[in-house]
Amino acid sequence: MSTATTSPGFHLVGRLLDPASRADPYPTYARFRDLGPVWIEEMSALVVPGYRDCETLLRDPRLSAERHHYFDAARERDPFPPDAPASVRQPWFLSMDPPDHTRLRRLVSGAFTARTVARMEPYVTRLVDDLLDRACERDTFDVVSGLAYSLPVTVICHLLGVPEEDERLFRDWSAQLTRQLDGFSFPGDEDLWAGGVVELHRYVNELVAERRRSPRRDDLISELLAARDGGDVLSHDELVSTIVLLLVAGHETTVNLIANAVLALLRHPAHLAALRADPGTAAAVVEEILRYDPPVQLTARIAREDLTVGAAQAPAGALVILLLAAAHRDPAANPDPDRFDPRRDQVRHLGFSAGPHFCLGAPLARLEGRVALAAFARRVREPRLVADPPPYREHINLRGVGELLVEHGAR
Ligand code: HEM
Protein backbone atom coordinates (compact mmCIF):
# COMPACT_ATOMS: atom_id res chain seq x y z
CA MET A 1 0.00 0.00 0.00
CA SER A 2 1.53 3.34 -1.00
CA THR A 3 1.67 6.16 1.52
CA ALA A 4 1.62 8.72 -1.29
CA THR A 5 -1.87 7.86 -2.45
CA THR A 6 -3.64 6.96 0.76
CA SER A 7 -4.66 8.99 3.80
CA PRO A 8 -2.51 8.55 6.96
CA GLY A 9 -5.36 6.76 8.74
CA PHE A 10 -5.90 4.30 5.89
CA HIS A 11 -2.17 3.65 5.75
CA LEU A 12 -2.25 2.71 9.46
CA VAL A 13 -5.24 0.40 8.91
CA GLY A 14 -3.17 -1.30 6.20
CA ARG A 15 -0.40 -1.78 8.73
CA LEU A 16 -2.77 -3.34 11.24
CA LEU A 17 -3.99 -5.77 8.57
CA ASP A 18 -0.43 -6.69 7.60
CA PRO A 19 0.44 -10.10 9.13
CA ALA A 20 3.96 -8.74 9.82
CA SER A 21 2.59 -6.42 12.53
CA ARG A 22 0.47 -9.09 14.18
CA ALA A 23 3.09 -9.93 16.81
CA ASP A 24 3.14 -6.31 17.97
CA PRO A 25 0.39 -3.96 16.76
CA TYR A 26 1.00 -1.53 19.65
CA PRO A 27 3.39 0.84 17.82
CA THR A 28 0.69 1.23 15.15
CA TYR A 29 -1.92 2.00 17.82
CA ALA A 30 0.45 4.67 19.19
CA ARG A 31 0.52 6.27 15.73
CA PHE A 32 -3.29 6.26 15.72
CA ARG A 33 -3.28 8.04 19.08
CA ASP A 34 -0.91 10.65 17.62
CA LEU A 35 -3.45 11.25 14.83
CA GLY A 36 -6.42 11.46 17.22
CA PRO A 37 -9.93 10.63 16.01
CA VAL A 38 -9.62 10.32 12.23
CA TRP A 39 -12.06 10.05 9.36
CA ILE A 40 -10.90 7.50 6.78
CA GLU A 41 -12.58 8.32 3.52
CA GLU A 42 -11.44 5.08 1.82
CA MET A 43 -13.47 3.05 4.36
CA SER A 44 -16.21 5.57 5.14
CA ALA A 45 -15.17 5.04 8.74
CA LEU A 46 -14.23 7.11 11.77
CA VAL A 47 -11.42 5.57 13.84
CA VAL A 48 -11.26 6.54 17.51
CA PRO A 49 -8.08 5.69 19.51
CA GLY A 50 -8.35 7.71 22.78
CA TYR A 51 -9.65 6.29 26.07
CA ARG A 52 -12.08 9.00 27.01
CA ASP A 53 -13.62 9.16 23.51
CA CYS A 54 -14.01 5.37 23.29
CA GLU A 55 -15.61 5.11 26.70
CA THR A 56 -18.01 8.00 26.01
CA LEU A 57 -19.01 6.69 22.58
CA LEU A 58 -19.73 3.17 23.88
CA ARG A 59 -22.44 4.74 26.05
CA ASP A 60 -23.68 7.23 23.44
CA PRO A 61 -27.21 6.46 22.13
CA ARG A 62 -26.35 8.29 18.89
CA LEU A 63 -24.38 5.15 18.01
CA SER A 64 -26.08 1.92 16.95
CA ALA A 65 -24.76 -1.62 17.45
CA GLU A 66 -26.51 -2.80 14.27
CA ARG A 67 -23.24 -3.04 12.36
CA HIS A 68 -24.16 -6.29 10.56
CA HIS A 69 -25.91 -4.17 7.90
CA TYR A 70 -22.58 -2.48 7.08
CA PHE A 71 -20.77 -5.80 6.64
CA ASP A 72 -23.70 -7.51 4.87
CA ALA A 73 -23.76 -4.65 2.35
CA ALA A 74 -20.05 -5.19 1.65
CA ARG A 75 -20.74 -8.80 0.59
CA GLU A 76 -21.08 -9.54 -3.06
CA ARG A 77 -23.47 -12.44 -2.57
CA ASP A 78 -25.57 -14.18 0.06
CA PRO A 79 -23.08 -16.54 1.74
CA PHE A 80 -25.73 -19.00 2.97
CA PRO A 81 -27.24 -21.86 0.94
CA PRO A 82 -31.04 -21.76 0.31
CA ASP A 83 -31.65 -24.66 2.72
CA ALA A 84 -29.83 -22.99 5.66
CA PRO A 85 -31.94 -22.72 8.85
CA ALA A 86 -33.72 -19.35 9.10
CA SER A 87 -31.89 -18.65 12.37
CA VAL A 88 -28.62 -17.94 10.49
CA ARG A 89 -30.16 -14.62 9.46
CA GLN A 90 -31.28 -13.68 12.95
CA PRO A 91 -28.84 -11.08 14.37
CA TRP A 92 -27.29 -11.67 17.80
CA PHE A 93 -28.32 -9.30 20.55
CA LEU A 94 -24.67 -8.19 20.53
CA SER A 95 -25.62 -6.43 17.29
CA MET A 96 -29.01 -5.08 18.38
CA ASP A 97 -30.23 -1.86 19.94
CA PRO A 98 -32.90 -1.38 22.60
CA PRO A 99 -35.66 -2.39 23.05
CA ASP A 100 -34.91 -5.82 21.45
CA HIS A 101 -31.38 -5.84 22.87
CA THR A 102 -32.69 -5.19 26.38
CA ARG A 103 -35.41 -7.85 26.12
CA LEU A 104 -33.07 -10.60 24.88
CA ARG A 105 -30.16 -9.74 27.16
CA ARG A 106 -32.44 -9.77 30.21
CA LEU A 107 -33.56 -13.34 29.47
CA VAL A 108 -30.06 -14.79 29.80
CA SER A 109 -28.46 -12.36 32.23
CA GLY A 110 -29.48 -14.35 35.32
CA ALA A 111 -27.18 -17.21 34.31
CA PHE A 112 -24.12 -14.93 34.29
CA THR A 113 -24.40 -12.82 37.43
CA ALA A 114 -21.37 -12.73 39.72
CA ARG A 115 -23.29 -14.78 42.33
CA THR A 116 -24.37 -17.51 39.92
CA VAL A 117 -20.92 -17.73 38.41
CA ALA A 118 -19.17 -17.87 41.80
CA ARG A 119 -20.95 -21.19 42.42
CA MET A 120 -19.08 -22.62 39.43
CA GLU A 121 -15.63 -22.13 40.95
CA PRO A 122 -15.16 -25.71 42.29
CA TYR A 123 -16.21 -27.10 38.89
CA VAL A 124 -13.84 -24.77 36.98
CA THR A 125 -10.99 -25.60 39.39
CA ARG A 126 -11.51 -29.33 38.81
CA LEU A 127 -11.48 -28.88 35.04
CA VAL A 128 -8.27 -26.81 35.14
CA ASP A 129 -6.54 -29.35 37.38
CA ASP A 130 -7.50 -32.22 35.05
CA LEU A 131 -6.25 -30.32 32.00
CA LEU A 132 -2.94 -29.45 33.67
CA ASP A 133 -2.52 -33.06 34.89
CA ARG A 134 -2.63 -34.17 31.28
CA ALA A 135 -0.60 -31.28 29.83
CA CYS A 136 2.23 -31.57 32.36
CA GLU A 137 2.81 -35.23 31.52
CA ARG A 138 4.80 -33.96 28.54
CA ASP A 139 8.04 -31.97 28.90
CA THR A 140 6.79 -29.52 26.29
CA PHE A 141 3.12 -28.65 25.91
CA ASP A 142 0.97 -26.17 24.05
CA VAL A 143 -0.85 -23.83 26.46
CA VAL A 144 -3.47 -23.08 23.80
CA SER A 145 -4.61 -26.62 22.99
CA GLY A 146 -3.71 -28.09 26.39
CA LEU A 147 -5.41 -25.54 28.65
CA ALA A 148 -6.78 -22.33 27.16
CA TYR A 149 -8.82 -23.87 24.35
CA SER A 150 -10.56 -26.63 26.28
CA LEU A 151 -11.64 -24.77 29.39
CA PRO A 152 -14.13 -22.19 28.04
CA VAL A 153 -15.77 -24.56 25.55
CA THR A 154 -16.30 -27.21 28.25
CA VAL A 155 -17.69 -24.64 30.69
CA ILE A 156 -20.14 -23.03 28.28
CA CYS A 157 -21.32 -26.42 26.96
CA HIS A 158 -21.90 -27.51 30.56
CA LEU A 159 -23.89 -24.36 31.29
CA LEU A 160 -26.02 -24.68 28.18
CA GLY A 161 -26.47 -28.42 28.53
CA VAL A 162 -24.61 -29.51 25.38
CA PRO A 163 -23.77 -33.23 25.73
CA GLU A 164 -20.08 -33.76 26.55
CA GLU A 165 -19.50 -36.01 23.55
CA ASP A 166 -20.49 -33.13 21.23
CA GLU A 167 -17.93 -30.65 22.57
CA ARG A 168 -15.38 -31.70 19.99
CA LEU A 169 -17.74 -30.43 17.27
CA PHE A 170 -17.31 -26.91 18.64
CA ARG A 171 -13.56 -27.15 18.46
CA ASP A 172 -13.88 -27.85 14.75
CA TRP A 173 -16.38 -25.05 14.16
CA SER A 174 -14.82 -22.45 16.37
CA ALA A 175 -12.11 -21.27 13.99
CA GLN A 176 -14.64 -20.70 11.19
CA LEU A 177 -17.21 -19.11 13.47
CA THR A 178 -15.09 -16.45 15.07
CA ARG A 179 -14.99 -14.96 11.61
CA GLN A 180 -18.48 -13.67 12.49
CA LEU A 181 -16.89 -11.61 15.25
CA ASP A 182 -14.25 -10.26 12.91
CA GLY A 183 -15.64 -8.31 10.00
CA PHE A 184 -12.32 -6.59 9.38
CA SER A 185 -9.78 -9.20 8.41
CA PHE A 186 -11.61 -10.61 5.40
CA PRO A 187 -9.34 -13.63 5.16
CA GLY A 188 -11.17 -14.81 2.04
CA ASP A 189 -12.69 -17.91 3.58
CA GLU A 190 -16.33 -16.86 3.28
CA ASP A 191 -17.56 -20.31 2.22
CA LEU A 192 -15.74 -22.05 5.04
CA TRP A 193 -17.17 -19.57 7.53
CA ALA A 194 -20.71 -19.79 6.14
CA GLY A 195 -20.48 -23.61 6.16
CA GLY A 196 -19.48 -23.56 9.85
CA VAL A 197 -22.31 -21.17 10.73
CA VAL A 198 -24.90 -23.34 8.95
CA GLU A 199 -23.66 -26.52 10.63
CA LEU A 200 -23.69 -24.95 14.08
CA HIS A 201 -27.20 -23.54 13.55
CA ARG A 202 -28.46 -26.95 12.38
CA TYR A 203 -26.92 -28.51 15.46
CA VAL A 204 -28.44 -25.94 17.86
CA ASN A 205 -31.85 -26.19 16.15
CA GLU A 206 -31.76 -29.94 16.78
CA LEU A 207 -30.57 -29.50 20.35
CA VAL A 208 -33.47 -27.14 21.05
CA ALA A 209 -35.93 -29.62 19.52
CA GLU A 210 -34.46 -32.37 21.69
CA ARG A 211 -34.75 -30.26 24.88
CA ARG A 212 -38.32 -29.44 23.98
CA ARG A 213 -39.08 -33.18 23.80
CA SER A 214 -37.30 -33.91 27.08
CA PRO A 215 -36.67 -30.76 29.14
CA ARG A 216 -34.12 -30.76 31.96
CA ARG A 217 -34.19 -28.67 35.06
CA ASP A 218 -30.58 -27.64 35.21
CA ASP A 219 -29.54 -26.15 31.90
CA LEU A 220 -29.83 -22.79 30.23
CA ILE A 221 -31.44 -24.06 27.02
CA SER A 222 -34.33 -25.58 28.98
CA GLU A 223 -34.69 -22.32 30.95
CA LEU A 224 -34.79 -20.29 27.74
CA LEU A 225 -37.35 -22.66 26.27
CA ALA A 226 -39.52 -22.25 29.35
CA ALA A 227 -39.22 -18.46 29.00
CA ARG A 228 -40.22 -18.71 25.35
CA ASP A 229 -43.14 -21.03 25.91
CA GLY A 230 -44.28 -19.16 29.02
CA GLY A 231 -44.51 -15.60 27.83
CA ASP A 232 -43.89 -15.71 24.08
CA VAL A 233 -41.08 -13.20 24.58
CA LEU A 234 -38.51 -15.01 22.50
CA SER A 235 -38.97 -16.26 18.94
CA HIS A 236 -37.49 -19.62 17.96
CA ASP A 237 -34.82 -17.96 15.81
CA GLU A 238 -33.94 -15.52 18.57
CA LEU A 239 -33.54 -18.47 20.93
CA VAL A 240 -31.19 -20.32 18.56
CA SER A 241 -29.23 -17.17 17.75
CA THR A 242 -28.76 -16.37 21.46
CA ILE A 243 -27.42 -19.86 22.15
CA VAL A 244 -25.01 -19.54 19.22
CA LEU A 245 -23.89 -16.14 20.53
CA LEU A 246 -23.13 -17.60 23.96
CA LEU A 247 -21.17 -20.46 22.41
CA VAL A 248 -19.11 -18.19 20.19
CA ALA A 249 -18.66 -14.97 22.22
CA GLY A 250 -17.29 -16.72 25.27
CA HIS A 251 -14.97 -19.11 23.54
CA GLU A 252 -12.15 -17.60 21.50
CA THR A 253 -12.09 -14.52 23.76
CA THR A 254 -11.41 -16.55 26.89
CA VAL A 255 -8.87 -18.75 25.08
CA ASN A 256 -7.00 -15.58 24.19
CA LEU A 257 -7.30 -14.11 27.67
CA ILE A 258 -5.56 -17.15 29.15
CA ALA A 259 -2.92 -17.53 26.41
CA ASN A 260 -2.11 -13.80 26.20
CA ALA A 261 -1.71 -13.71 29.98
CA VAL A 262 0.54 -16.79 30.11
CA LEU A 263 2.68 -15.23 27.37
CA ALA A 264 3.00 -11.94 29.29
CA LEU A 265 3.87 -13.80 32.50
CA LEU A 266 6.54 -15.87 30.76
CA ARG A 267 8.04 -12.67 29.38
CA HIS A 268 7.96 -11.13 32.88
CA PRO A 269 9.20 -13.87 35.20
CA ALA A 270 9.10 -11.65 38.30
CA HIS A 271 5.33 -11.29 37.92
CA LEU A 272 4.99 -15.05 37.37
CA ALA A 273 6.96 -15.66 40.57
CA ALA A 274 4.75 -13.16 42.43
CA LEU A 275 1.65 -15.01 41.23
CA ARG A 276 3.10 -18.35 42.32
CA ALA A 277 3.85 -16.88 45.75
CA ASP A 278 0.37 -15.37 46.08
CA PRO A 279 -2.37 -16.96 43.93
CA GLY A 280 -4.71 -14.26 45.26
CA THR A 281 -3.09 -11.84 42.79
CA ALA A 282 -4.48 -13.76 39.79
CA ALA A 283 -7.49 -11.43 39.57
CA ALA A 284 -5.12 -8.45 39.15
CA VAL A 285 -3.21 -10.30 36.41
CA VAL A 286 -6.50 -10.85 34.56
CA GLU A 287 -7.42 -7.14 34.74
CA GLU A 288 -3.96 -6.07 33.61
CA ILE A 289 -3.95 -8.42 30.60
CA LEU A 290 -7.41 -7.15 29.62
CA ARG A 291 -5.77 -3.73 29.48
CA TYR A 292 -2.28 -4.54 28.22
CA ASP A 293 -2.95 -7.19 25.56
CA PRO A 294 -6.74 -7.53 25.34
CA PRO A 295 -8.46 -10.45 23.56
CA VAL A 296 -10.89 -7.97 21.93
CA GLN A 297 -8.81 -5.24 20.35
CA LEU A 298 -11.56 -3.13 18.84
CA THR A 299 -15.27 -2.92 18.31
CA ALA A 300 -17.52 -0.95 15.97
CA ARG A 301 -20.76 0.98 15.90
CA ILE A 302 -22.79 2.84 13.29
CA ALA A 303 -23.42 6.60 13.59
CA ARG A 304 -27.20 7.20 13.66
CA GLU A 305 -26.66 10.91 12.97
CA ASP A 306 -23.80 13.19 11.93
CA LEU A 307 -21.07 12.98 14.57
CA THR A 308 -18.12 15.15 15.58
CA VAL A 309 -15.37 13.57 17.68
CA GLY A 310 -12.46 15.89 18.40
CA ALA A 311 -11.47 17.42 15.07
CA ALA A 312 -13.03 14.58 13.03
CA GLN A 313 -16.50 14.33 11.57
CA ALA A 314 -18.52 11.36 10.40
CA PRO A 315 -21.82 11.46 8.54
CA ALA A 316 -24.89 9.48 9.63
CA GLY A 317 -24.53 5.84 8.55
CA ALA A 318 -20.73 5.78 8.89
CA LEU A 319 -18.85 2.99 10.64
CA VAL A 320 -17.23 4.09 13.90
CA ILE A 321 -14.27 1.91 14.89
CA LEU A 322 -13.32 2.11 18.56
CA LEU A 323 -9.71 1.03 19.04
CA LEU A 324 -10.02 -0.35 22.57
CA ALA A 325 -6.47 -1.73 22.68
CA ALA A 326 -5.10 1.68 21.66
CA ALA A 327 -7.28 3.40 24.27
CA HIS A 328 -5.88 1.16 27.03
CA ARG A 329 -2.40 2.51 26.35
CA ASP A 330 -3.55 6.12 26.34
CA PRO A 331 -1.26 7.70 28.96
CA ALA A 332 -4.16 9.91 30.06
CA ALA A 333 -5.97 6.74 31.23
CA ASN A 334 -3.10 4.59 32.51
CA PRO A 335 0.32 5.98 33.46
CA ASP A 336 3.35 4.23 31.88
CA PRO A 337 0.90 2.30 29.68
CA ASP A 338 3.38 0.12 27.74
CA ARG A 339 4.52 -1.59 30.93
CA PHE A 340 2.88 -4.90 31.93
CA ASP A 341 2.30 -4.46 35.63
CA PRO A 342 -0.40 -6.36 37.51
CA ARG A 343 0.43 -4.29 40.63
CA ARG A 344 -0.97 -1.05 39.24
CA ASP A 345 -3.05 0.95 41.72
CA GLN A 346 -5.81 1.37 39.19
CA VAL A 347 -6.37 -0.40 35.87
CA ARG A 348 -8.65 1.37 33.43
CA HIS A 349 -9.74 -0.79 30.53
CA LEU A 350 -12.59 -1.36 28.11
CA GLY A 351 -11.62 -5.00 27.53
CA PHE A 352 -15.22 -6.01 28.22
CA SER A 353 -16.59 -2.86 26.52
CA ALA A 354 -18.81 -0.38 28.40
CA GLY A 355 -22.43 0.76 28.32
CA PRO A 356 -25.38 -1.44 27.31
CA HIS A 357 -23.25 -4.08 25.56
CA PHE A 358 -20.82 -4.57 28.45
CA CYS A 359 -19.76 -8.21 28.23
CA LEU A 360 -22.42 -10.41 29.72
CA GLY A 361 -19.88 -13.16 30.39
CA ALA A 362 -17.36 -10.96 32.24
CA PRO A 363 -17.79 -12.69 35.64
CA LEU A 364 -17.37 -16.10 34.00
CA ALA A 365 -14.35 -15.00 31.94
CA ARG A 366 -12.74 -13.50 35.05
CA LEU A 367 -13.32 -16.70 37.01
CA GLU A 368 -11.89 -18.96 34.28
CA GLY A 369 -8.89 -16.66 33.77
CA ARG A 370 -8.14 -16.35 37.47
CA VAL A 371 -8.35 -20.09 38.17
CA ALA A 372 -6.34 -21.07 35.06
CA LEU A 373 -3.53 -18.57 35.67
CA ALA A 374 -3.17 -19.33 39.38
CA ALA A 375 -3.01 -23.06 38.61
CA PHE A 376 -0.52 -22.56 35.77
CA ALA A 377 1.80 -20.59 38.08
CA ARG A 378 1.46 -23.17 40.86
CA ARG A 379 1.72 -26.33 38.79
CA VAL A 380 4.11 -25.61 35.94
CA ARG A 381 7.65 -25.34 37.28
CA GLU A 382 10.42 -23.42 35.48
CA PRO A 383 8.37 -22.80 32.36
CA ARG A 384 10.19 -21.48 29.28
CA LEU A 385 8.80 -20.21 26.00
CA VAL A 386 9.83 -22.36 23.04
CA ALA A 387 9.22 -19.62 20.43
CA ASP A 388 9.02 -15.88 21.00
CA PRO A 389 7.04 -14.35 19.40
CA PRO A 390 4.69 -17.30 19.00
CA PRO A 391 2.58 -17.54 15.83
CA TYR A 392 -0.49 -15.28 15.92
CA ARG A 393 -3.96 -15.98 14.54
CA GLU A 394 -5.04 -13.92 11.60
CA HIS A 395 -7.81 -11.92 13.28
CA ILE A 396 -7.46 -8.21 13.72
CA ASN A 397 -10.05 -7.63 16.42
CA LEU A 398 -9.63 -10.91 18.29
CA ARG A 399 -6.02 -11.05 19.36
CA GLY A 400 -4.44 -14.35 20.28
CA VAL A 401 -1.78 -16.88 19.44
CA GLY A 402 -2.40 -20.09 17.54
CA GLU A 403 0.09 -22.04 19.63
CA LEU A 404 2.07 -21.33 22.79
CA LEU A 405 4.66 -24.03 23.37
CA VAL A 406 6.12 -24.17 26.86
CA GLU A 407 8.98 -26.34 28.12
CA HIS A 408 8.96 -27.00 31.82
CA GLY A 409 10.90 -28.71 34.59
CA ALA A 410 9.59 -31.04 37.26
CA ARG A 411 6.00 -30.62 38.41
C1 HEM B 1 -20.03 -8.83 24.69
C2 HEM B 1 -15.29 -9.24 25.53
C3 HEM B 1 -15.99 -13.62 27.50
C4 HEM B 1 -20.65 -13.35 26.33
C5 HEM B 1 -18.68 -8.56 24.77
C6 HEM B 1 -18.07 -7.33 24.35
C7 HEM B 1 -16.74 -7.44 24.58
C8 HEM B 1 -16.51 -8.74 25.15
C9 HEM B 1 -15.65 -6.41 24.30
C10 HEM B 1 -18.82 -6.10 23.80
C11 HEM B 1 -18.55 -5.82 22.36
C12 HEM B 1 -19.15 -4.50 21.97
O1 HEM B 1 -19.39 -3.62 22.80
O2 HEM B 1 -19.35 -4.33 20.76
C13 HEM B 1 -15.08 -10.47 26.12
C14 HEM B 1 -13.79 -10.94 26.57
C15 HEM B 1 -13.99 -12.17 27.13
C16 HEM B 1 -15.40 -12.47 27.02
C17 HEM B 1 -12.49 -10.17 26.43
C18 HEM B 1 -13.01 -13.10 27.74
C19 HEM B 1 -11.92 -12.70 28.28
C20 HEM B 1 -17.32 -13.90 27.42
C21 HEM B 1 -17.96 -15.08 27.95
C22 HEM B 1 -19.27 -15.01 27.59
C23 HEM B 1 -19.45 -13.78 26.85
C24 HEM B 1 -17.26 -16.17 28.76
C25 HEM B 1 -20.40 -15.95 27.89
C26 HEM B 1 -20.38 -17.18 27.88
C27 HEM B 1 -20.86 -12.11 25.79
C28 HEM B 1 -22.15 -11.66 25.31
C29 HEM B 1 -21.99 -10.36 24.83
C30 HEM B 1 -20.58 -10.03 25.03
C31 HEM B 1 -23.44 -12.46 25.34
C32 HEM B 1 -23.04 -9.44 24.23
C33 HEM B 1 -23.51 -8.47 25.29
C34 HEM B 1 -24.51 -7.48 24.73
O3 HEM B 1 -24.51 -7.18 23.54
O4 HEM B 1 -25.33 -7.01 25.55
N1 HEM B 1 -17.72 -9.41 25.27
N2 HEM B 1 -16.02 -11.42 26.39
N3 HEM B 1 -18.25 -13.13 26.78
N4 HEM B 1 -19.94 -11.12 25.61
FE1 HEM B 1 -18.00 -11.22 26.10
Image (spheres, helix red, strand yellow):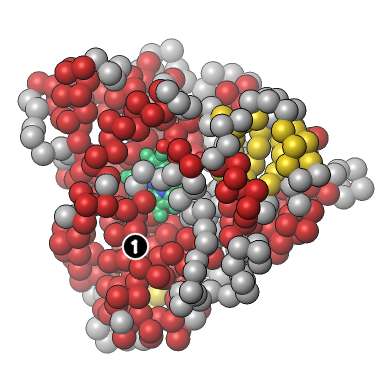
The residue nearer to you, when weighing 358 against 219, is 358
| Disc 1 residue: CB within 8 Å of ligand 1 | yes
Direction from residue 152 to residue 44 in the image, left or right: right
Q: Residue 332, how many percent across, how many down?
A: 66, 64
Q: How crowded is the residue under tag 1: few (<14 C-alpha within 10 Å), some, or many (20+)?
A: many
Quarter of the figure that contains the C terminus? bottom left
The image quadrant where one finds ligand 1 is top left
Q: Quadrant of residue 368?
A: bottom left
Which is nearer the eye, 374 or 33? 33
- Residue 332 visible? The answer is yes
Tell me if residue 145 comes above or below residue 168 in the rendering: below
6 vs 250, left or right, is right
| Residue at 49 percent of width and 75 percent of height | 344
Q: Position of residue 162 (x, y in %)?
A: 20, 38
- Identify the residue at horizontal 48%, vertical 42% (top origin): 355
Q: Residue at x 58, y 37 (%)?
A: 60
Would you name the residue on which mark 1 appears? 369
Residue 141: percent from left, percent from top: 35, 71
In the displayed structure, would residue 118 be above or below residue 91?
A: below
Pick out the residue farthest to the right: 4
Q: Report the amino acid beneath label 1.
A: Gly
The correct choice, above or below, for 325 with respect to 279 in the image is above
Instruction: Residue 394: tell me if it is visible.
Output: no
Secondary element at tag 1: helix
Q: How many marks?
A: 1
Asked where in the image residue 185 lies, by quadrant, the reply is top right
Most foreground residue, 195 or 17? 17
